[in-house]
Amino acid sequence: MQKIISAVVADIGKVLLGKDHQVKLALACLLSRGHLLIEDLPGMGKTTLAHALAQALGLSYKRVQFTSDMLPADIVGVSIFERDSGSFRFHEGPVFSQLLLADEINRASPKTQSALLEAMEERQVSVDGETRPLPQPFFVIATQNPMHQSGTFSLPESQLDRFLMRISLGYPTREAERALFQGVDPREQLRQLRPRLDRAGLAKLQALVGQVKASASLLDYLERLVLHTRQSQECPVGLSPRGALALLHAARAWALIHARGHVVPEDIQAVLPAVAGHRLQSESGDGAQLVERLIRQVDVIAA
């Protein structure tokens, strides 16, 4: 399976040049059965990464462009009366897919954003008093523009916490941008991308994540990190139990991607910014700086 993981990362790396670290984080998120939030400026490749992941992992894929006038029914679906049968028939919305790309999610109103909460947590939606299961596996990859841009709404904390990771792509390296100038077309690379996995193969990889071992000393380190966020005056809101579990699952997936059968402290540190950055709140609102200080202040080995 390690060859398949390496092939997936390499294939997506041909589409999204110079972003191997972010690609591995995104893959670790999906292998951990989590949802992914990508925050960056327009034109950085957020949508391209989501589409490439869907194709490389062999997942059915639907995209929803969020706008200010979108309604919850535009996502989950709606029941329409059919005259011929004399009854209502439910028409599924785009949420009924294995990978849903919620593009520019923070341009929709909070009411519409909340339509995804049940789907992300329970893998089901409730419409007209009936609960409908979603396809398995089910992932949400949402993109959002920076909050200083016009026409955006803040994601509520309850929804932010549903995302296992938040990542940012950033500007390309000089080498990657030069390759774009010289004619490397990401859209053409995306069209040539072929699935490396099917549903059974992805399920097997996800099961392997759960088998990656975490020693008692490693769990002690994890507990010290979590406890520090809850006791530090720099963090008005510390990591919740869900956030702590997300950190462990992501570290296991990161270890698997790097061909290790056990988690090391460097695995936790590698995924910590993506897992905890959007969960830790400060007066400045900059969770990234809090995470950097957290890594420096908490010893790997207990004193």
Image (cartoon, rainbow, N blue to C red):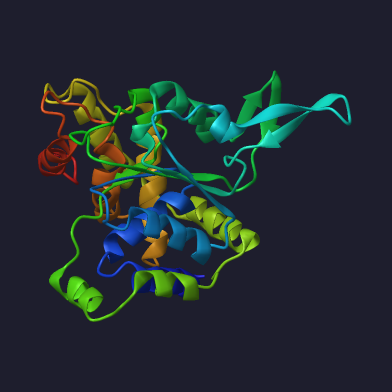
Q: In the image, is 77 to the left or to the right of 70?
A: right
Q: In the image, is 243 to the left or to the right of 129?
A: left
Please tell me in which quadrant of the rendered image residue 7 appears. bottom left
Q: Position of residue 215 (x, y in %)?
A: 37, 49
Q: In the image, is 174 to the left or to the right of 110?
A: left
Which residue is depicted at the point 36% across and 41% down? Answer: 104
Q: Where is 254 relative to 278, above or below?
A: below
Q: Where is 175 relative to 253, above or below?
A: below
Q: Where is 212 relative to 119, above or below?
A: below
Q: Between residue 260 and residue 269, name the one nearer to us.
A: 269
Label count reads 0
Quarter of the image that includes the C terminus: top left
Q: Between residue 5 and residue 56, name the one nearer to us.
A: 56
Q: Between residue 112 and residue 226, name the one nearer to us.
A: 112
Which residue is depicted at the point 13% across and 71% down? Answer: 174
Q: Position of residue 95 (x, y in %)?
A: 57, 40
Q: Position of residue 291 (x, y in %)?
A: 17, 40
Q: Where is 288 relative to 187, above or below?
A: above
Looking at this view, name the residue that lies furthest to the bottom.
182
Q: Between residue 120 and residue 251, name the one nearer to us.
A: 120
Looking at this view, name the residue that lies furthest to the front.
83
Q: Position of residue 57 (x, y in %)?
A: 53, 62
Res. 32 visible in picture: yes
Please tell me in which quadrant of the rendered image residue 58 appears. bottom right
Res. 262 visible in picture: no
Please tell me in which quadrant of the rendered image residue 161 appears. top left
Which residue is depicted at the point 27% across and 55% down? Answer: 43
